[in-house]
Image (cartoon, rainbow, N blue to C red):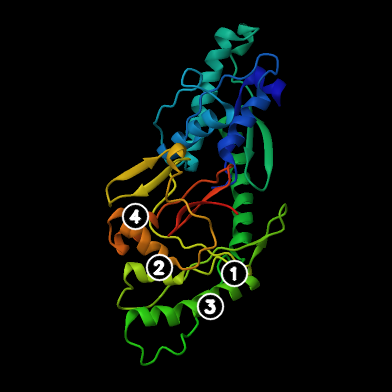
Amino acid sequence: MRERSREHGAFIVNMASTGCGKTLGNARIMYALADPALGMRCAFAMGLRTLTLQTGKAFRDMLALSDDDLAIRVGGSATLPPALVQGLFEAYRNGRQHFQLNRAARPTGAETPPAICCAWMDEFHQQAQDCSDAASFAQTHGQFARRRHGELARLAAKPRRRAAVRPVQGLQGIRPIPLLAQAFAPQVLSAAINLHHDHHSVDPETRKRVSFGLVRMANIEPFPRDITLTLLPDEDDEKALLHQVMDGGRRGENLYIPVDRSQCEHLPDTLVRGDRIEPWGITDYMAALSALASELELSPATCAERFGTATVRPNDNGWRYHPVLGFAQKR
C-alpha cells in the first residue's frame, strides 16, 4: 500500500468510534505510508474544534513537539455524511490528477484519473481498495458502512447498563435531613458494592475489578451540600474503594478548581503541596473539614464546595486528592 500510494496517492476513511484511539491512530497510519528514510510531513484536518485541539495537544505532549514543529488551526465540519465523503474523494482524485500531471515521474501518462489507493478502517475491520472513479469508491464505501452497521447493531443488542431499583428501608419517621442522610448512605453503598460484584470488568494487567455506576435519588427536597459528605466511604475499608464525583472537570492535563460558575483557577503541579497536606486514613471527615474551614475562615459548606469538586490527573510522585482532606501522599 505504501508503494501504490506513493504513485497514486491515498484516501483513508477512519470510521472508528469515540475512544478507540483515532487521535494517534491517524498519525500512525500516515507514518506507515511515508518513506522511512524521508520521514513524514502531514497536515491533519479534524471534524470538531475540540478534537482538533485535543489532537494537536496530544501530539505536542506525547511526541515532544514545539510550536515551531506543530501548528494547530481550527476549522472544518463536525460530521462526515456519505455525500460529503464522496465529494471529498472526488475533489482529492481531481487534485491528485493535476498533481501527477505536473509532478509525476511520467507527466504525459497522468492524463487519465489515477487509481487512488483507498482504505477504510474502524475498531472491527480494515479494508483497502484501489478506486479510479467515483462509482467504485461509493460501492466500496457503502459495503464497509453496511458491514460496520451490522457490527454496531450486534453490540447494541448487548446490555450496556444494568440497573436495579432498591427500596430504602428504615427511614419512616425520620425527619431531620442529617439523620436521613446517615441512614440512607449505608444502603446506597451496599447496593453499589453488590452491583459492582455482579457487573465489573477485570483489568488485564493489574487484575483489579473496575465498574462505573450512577445513583439516582428520587428525593424531592435536596440534601444540603455538607450532608453529601456522609456518603463518603471509610478510607480504611479495604473491601472496596469508592470515589465521590461532583461538579468539576478535567481539561487537558491541568488541574481546575471551580471558584464559581463562570471562573476556574488553574493550579500548577508546583502548588499542589502545602501545609494542608495530611496523610490518608483519617476517617473523621467532618472534624477535618471544620478545622480546614476554620483555618481558611470559610464556612464548612463553602469549604466543602471549593475543595471537594476538583479532579486531579495521576501523579507519578504519589500524590492524590481527597474531597475533604485536600492533597495527600499515599502511605
**For the residues marked 1 and 2, what is the alpha-carbon distance in whole angstroms?**
18 Å
Q: Amino acid at mark 2?
A: Met
**For the residues marked 4 and 3, what is the alpha-carbon distance in whole angstroms?**
32 Å
Q: Secondary structure at mark 4?
A: helix
> In the image, is 31 to the left or to the right of 186?
right
Q: Secondary structure at mark 1?
A: loop
Say few, some or many: other residues with alpha carbon within 10 Å of mark 1 (under 14 / 14 to 19 / 20 or more): few
Q: Are marks 2 and 4 in contact (CB under 8 Å)?
A: no
Q: Are marks 3 and 2 in contact (CB under 8 Å)?
A: no
| Residue 182: image location, x then y, percent | 43, 79
Identify residue for label 2.
286
Q: Quadrant of the C terminus?
A: bottom right
Q: Nearer the viewer, residue 76 or 246?
A: 246
Identify residue for label 4.
306
User: Residue visible at 62% across and 66% down?
Assistant: 158
User: Residue visible at 64% across and 66% down?
Assistant: 200
**For the residues marked 1 and 4, what is the alpha-carbon distance in whole angstroms?**
26 Å
